[in-house]
Amino acid sequence: MEDNIKLGDPIFNQMLFVLDKPVTEANHKDYRYENEELLQISDGIWAMPAYMKDDDDFSLFFIVTEIDDGNTVIAFSQGEKKGADFSLSDPMVTGEGLNRLTAHDKDKAASILHFLNMISKAAEGNWRMVEGD
């Protein structure tokens, strides 16, 4: 990731984290965050809580999936509770999800950024800039 782009900067909304290989049943446990583990929620789509607290309406989930260009990415979705029903929002670019969390819990966002940067340092993924809307 470029050194001049920081968590919380509007331009960080355009940062996407791309994995070097797809997540599979064989390797999904390699991407554990804290005490959480990726679960396959649909064919080729994996999810894992990134931020979820009992006393907080805001929640954020890692979403790992292949996008149209064939790359496997780590994106985010917000949890949405409507009565007894719980669903996930449409996925958002990695940086946008982290920026939303930064506005809510800066320390947790920094922890997740560190987690992603460790994947990058292990040469298993990297940050890319995507076009804005």
Image (spheres, helix red, strand yellow):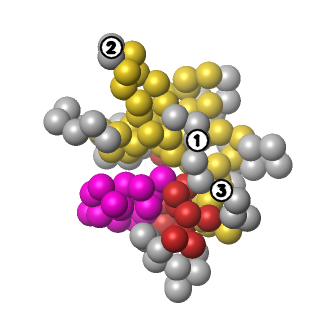
Distance (Cα) linking label 1 and label 2? 22 Å
Is the stretch drawn in magenta largely helix, strand or loop? helix
Q: Is mark 1 on a helix, strand or loop?
A: loop
Question: Which badge, 3 or 1, comes first in the chain's sequence?
Answer: 3
Q: Is residue 131 above or below residue 39?
A: below
Residue 70: x and y, percent?
Answer: 80, 46
Of the 4 image quadrants, the one containing the N terminus is: bottom right
Please provide the residue range marked out in magenta. Answer: 97-115
The type of residue carrying mark 3 is Val
How many marks can you see? 3
- Mark number displayed over residue 84: 2
Asked if labels 2 and 3 touch by Cβ distance under 8 angstroms, the answer is no
Question: Which badge, 1 or 2, comes first in the chain's sequence?
Answer: 2
At label 2, counting other C-alpha atoms closer than 10 Å, the crowd grade (few under 14, some 14-19, many 20 or more) is few
Q: What element carries label 3?
A: strand
Residue 115: x and y, percent?
Answer: 42, 59
Is 111 inside the magenta-drawn segment?
yes
Residue assigned mark 1:
91
Residue shown at the point (60%, 65%) measured from the top left: 15
- Mark number displayed over residue 18: 3
- Mark number displayed over residue 27: none
Residue shown at the point (55%, 23%) measured from the top left: 41
